[in-house]
Image (tube, grey):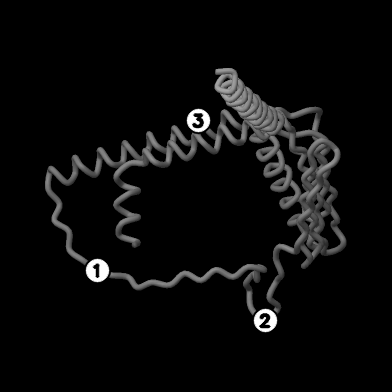
Amino acid sequence: MEKVNIIFQSKNEKMVIRMKIFILVIAILFLLLFIIFITKLNIFIRYYHNGDDDELMVRIRAWKVFSYTFQAPLIKIDNDSPSLIVEEEQGVGGMANEKKVKITFETIIRDLKEFMDFLQHVVGFHKIVRRFLSHVSVKDMRWTTDIGVSDAALTGFLTGMAWSVKGGIVGLISNYTKMKGLPKIAITPHFQQTLSHTELKCIVSFRIGHSIIAALLMLRHWRRRPALFQASEEKAT
């Protein structure tokens, strides 16, 4: 009898140990997930343009320990033709097919319904993106530009256009994100020489948890895409 009790106690002790290990593993996993969710990413962005040279540098940091840097040229100008050469080439091939379509009252109603579903889908997607951007902070924004085309009138016109473009972009950023501090923007016209130079620097910050939630919402929203998207995808495959 005593031997049976000892065996039973040993089994209970093993079960208790296994349960404690299981709880410990679950607690560690929850702790890691919590740390990941509250981790803030600081993304340092620098875009540099000078004549034919374009360069983009992105540095991602977390907890002032982990760092990842991406740096690459963006665009080169082809001197032989009025075109742009990018580092990555994408080829799109296909043939245009002609077909006759019969338009009836039912097809008009169906197309109108699909179009309304498409608008609702886009609006919903916009809400998800805007909700995520409301948690994004932008700070230390500096955008300097030097421009000149050796023509005073045209240089003045391009300078005014540049101010309009910059004002619109900064307005969108401040409307959708949290702008920390006033951005430093400068445009210097050069009336006696041809010059094209711009440099943009800023720091974008957000927590990983907000990006994960936004990604999950986008995935769920995409699965509920309207029939217009699904039909086009089926035709493509």
Task: Pick whichever of labels 2 and 1 is earlier in the sequence.
Answer: 2
Neighbourhood count class around disc 3 (C-alpha, 10 Å): few under 14, some 14–19, many 20 upward: few
Residue type at mark 2: give it. Answer: Asp
The answer to whether residue 69 is seen in the rendering is yes
Q: Is residue 58 left or right of residue 222?
A: right
Query: Residue beneath label 3, please?
Result: 127
Decide: marks 3, 1 in contact (CB < 8 A)? Answer: no
Q: Residue furthest bottom?
A: 80
Q: Is residue 129 left or right of residue 101?
A: right
Separation (CA) of disc 3 from disc 1: 37 Å
Query: Residue beneath label 2, please?
Result: 80
Residue type at mark 1: give it. Answer: Glu
Residue 225 placement (x, y as % from top left)? 37, 41
**Residue 54 in which image quadrant:** bottom right
Query: Residue beneath label 1, please?
Result: 98
The answer to whether residue 177 is seen in the rendering is no
Task: Pick whichever of labels 3 and 1 is earlier in the sequence.
Answer: 1
**Front tag of 3 and 1:** 3
**Front tag of 3 and 2:** 3
Task: Pick whichever of labels 3 and 2 is earlier in the sequence.
Answer: 2
